[in-house]
Image (cartoon, helix red, strand yellow):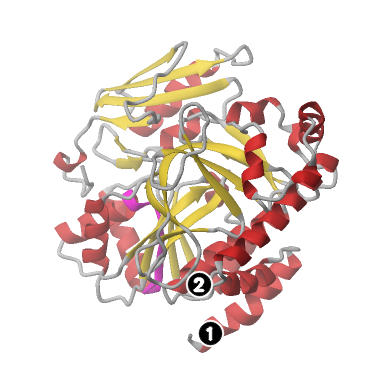
């Protein structure tokens, strides 16, 4: 650790978190110890925290107060995390229907978040300081596994407007102090990518963090133009928010000269799992109870594939209890060779977001169109299909609150990104069927980006 990193990690960052009323430092210190605890000690902690979460929900969260009373759910009978199976699942439709009733009457300073989710259904939910503290601590612990600490130079390649629209002077000063550089992943034209490469070379980051598809895209551009990026001292590329494909991992590792660490989670479910240098995808076991269920809702044993259901134990302000993520995964019952006792996810099918290609050849992240539709009132589901450079179809499943006059706005916004001559067909449909895998793909591009000389991967 350099003197500057030590100053940030040990003094400046803790001071910032204290001013924000976040308990991140304490939580992180505890996580550094508990990752090596015996399984029975970890389980005891989880049961204790589950009792606290459910007790608070039953007393202070209107939705759960009514639900527990209706079910006759006795909080005193909780002796194991498996007691959760007596409660119903929480899905996006339930959150949308009971958003206000899911807020604790003791909650303060709730932050509003939006996500499209893996099914493309818009979702609004809220996060309190406790949840933020635990999520930041979980990420902090995971990056330290790779020898990267807060204060080390970091490039973040991201596409969420939550981050990109909050770059005021205070945020810019903080990022500069923390040595974090945020790059927008919406547009990945050759000119943009060349600029990103220049910024990465100038910063010489210790860590890359962002979408695997975006870093693979940059890596391809560098490779095609004979630009070396493996001499910058990058220790790890942390990728998340999409499914990591083997060819992307190999490409990023080769071009950037660093290992790739997969991360799985979301704004709604939290940081579910992080990969360690030994290769294991460790669950954030202190904070999360992860279940795998079959289509009928039965809990499956380790080794069997099913939908990932998450209970986040640090969500008293807006509880996520037995939350259906819509993603498919498999739990592992074998320990990791690294020595950590945190259980493993054996395999994950994360969210996969395709690139879109504008008429002029500009390659952009699929999120550039997703954000046009996912937060519109009344939109229940959507799917964006780019059939060719000349035609893109957008299907919407809506309810009675949807305003049809928004459809021309969607068309105009899409043309502004893809090209004024592109045909945009926006249609209302009764349902959007899932893929054969059972998952929904909310962006599908049939344009072969590799043939467009943009440096994109196919």
Q: Nearer the viewer, residue 57 or 401?
A: 57
Does residue 169 show up?
no
User: Any magenta on residue 206?
Assistant: yes
Q: Is residue 95 above or below residue 409?
A: below
Q: Residue at x 65, y 81 (%)?
A: 11
Q: Is residue 54 left or right of residue 236?
A: right
Q: Residue at x 67, y 61 (%)?
A: 45
Q: Exactly how many numbered labels are in the figure?
A: 2
Q: Which residue is mark 1?
A: 4
Location of residue 172 in the rendering, given as x and y in whole percent from the top left corner = 57, 63
The magenta segment: 203-213
> Helix, strand or loop at disc 2?
loop
Q: Residue at x 45, y 15 (%)?
A: 431
Q: Earlier in the sequence, mark 1 or mark 2?
A: 1
Q: Is residue 11 left or right of residue 76?
A: left
Q: Residues within 10 Å of mark 2 (few under 14, many from 20)?
A: some
Location of residue 340 in the rendering, given as x and y in whole percent from the top left corner = 47, 70
Q: Marks 2 and 1: in contact by CB < 8 Å?
A: yes
Can you name the residue that lies furthest to the bottom here? 3
Mark drawn on residue 179: 2
Q: Quadrant of the C terminus?
A: top left
Q: Is residue 221 above or below residue 300?
A: below
Location of residue 455 in the rendering, given as x and y in whole percent from the top left corner = 21, 49
Q: Is residue 7 left or right of residue 445?
A: right
Q: Nearer the viewer, residue 197 or 78?
A: 78
> Helix, strand or loop at disc 1?
helix
Q: CA distance from mark 1 to mark 2?
A: 10 Å
Q: Residues within 10 Å of mark 1 (few under 14, many from 20)?
A: few
Does residue 294 show up?
yes
């Amino acid at each position: 650790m350099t003197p500057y990193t030590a100053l940030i990690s040990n003094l400046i960052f803790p001071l910032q978190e204290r001013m924000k009323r976040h308990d991140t430092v304490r939580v992180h210190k505890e996580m550094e110890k508990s990752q090596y605890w015996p399984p029975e000690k970890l389980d005891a902690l989880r049961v204790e925290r589950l009792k606290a979460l459910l007790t608070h929900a039953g007393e202070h969260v209107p939705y759960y107060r009514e639900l527990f009373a209706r079910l006759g759910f006795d909080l005193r009978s909780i002796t194991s995390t498996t007691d959760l199976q007596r409660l119903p699942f929480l899905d996006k439709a339930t959150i949308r229907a009971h958003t206000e009733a899911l807020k604790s009457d003791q909650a303060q300073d709730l932050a509003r978040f939006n996500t499209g989710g893996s099914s493309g259904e818009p979702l609004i939910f809220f996060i309190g300081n406790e949840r933020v503290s635990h999520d930041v601590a979980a990420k902090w612990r995971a990056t330290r596994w790779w020898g990267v600490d807060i204060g080390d130079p970091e490039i973040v390649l991201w596409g969420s407007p939550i981050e990109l629209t909050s770059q005021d002077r205070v945020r810019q000063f903080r990022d500069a102090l923390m040595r974090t550089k945020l790059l927008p992943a919406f547009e990945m034209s050759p000119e943009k990518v060349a600029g990103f490469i220049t910024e990465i070379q100038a910063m010489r980051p210790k860590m890359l963090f962002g979408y695997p598809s975006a870093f693979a895209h940059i890596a391809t551009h560098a490779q095609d133009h004979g630009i070396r990026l493996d001499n910058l001292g990058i220790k790890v590329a942390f990728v998340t928010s999409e499914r990591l494909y083997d060819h992307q991992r190999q490409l990023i590792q080769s071009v950037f000269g660093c290992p790739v660490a997969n991360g799985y989670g979301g704004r709604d479910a939290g940081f579910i799992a992080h990969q360690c240098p030994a290769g294991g995808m460790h669950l954030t076991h202190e904070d999360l109870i992860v279940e795998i269920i079959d289509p009928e809702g039965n809990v499956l044993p380790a080794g069997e594939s099913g939908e990932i259901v998450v209970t986040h134990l640090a969500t008293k302000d807006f509880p996520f209890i037995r939350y259906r993520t819509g993603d498919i995964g498999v739990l592992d019952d074998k320990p990791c060779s690294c020595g950590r006792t945190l259980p493993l996810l054996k395999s994950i099918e994360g969210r996969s977001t395709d690139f879109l290609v504008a008429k002029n050849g500009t390659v952009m992240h699929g999120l550039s169109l997703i954000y046009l539709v996912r937060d519109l009132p009344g939109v229940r589901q959507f799917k964006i299909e780019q059939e060719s450079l000349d035609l893109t179809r957008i299907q919407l499943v809506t309810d009675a609150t949807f305003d049809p006059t928004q459809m021309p706005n969607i068309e105009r916004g899409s043309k502004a990104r893809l090209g004024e001559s592109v045909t945009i067909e926006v249609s209302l449909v009764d349902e959007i069927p899932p893929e054969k895998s059972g998952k929904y793909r909310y962006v599908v591009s049939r344009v072969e980006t590799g043939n467009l000389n943009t440096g994109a991967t196919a």
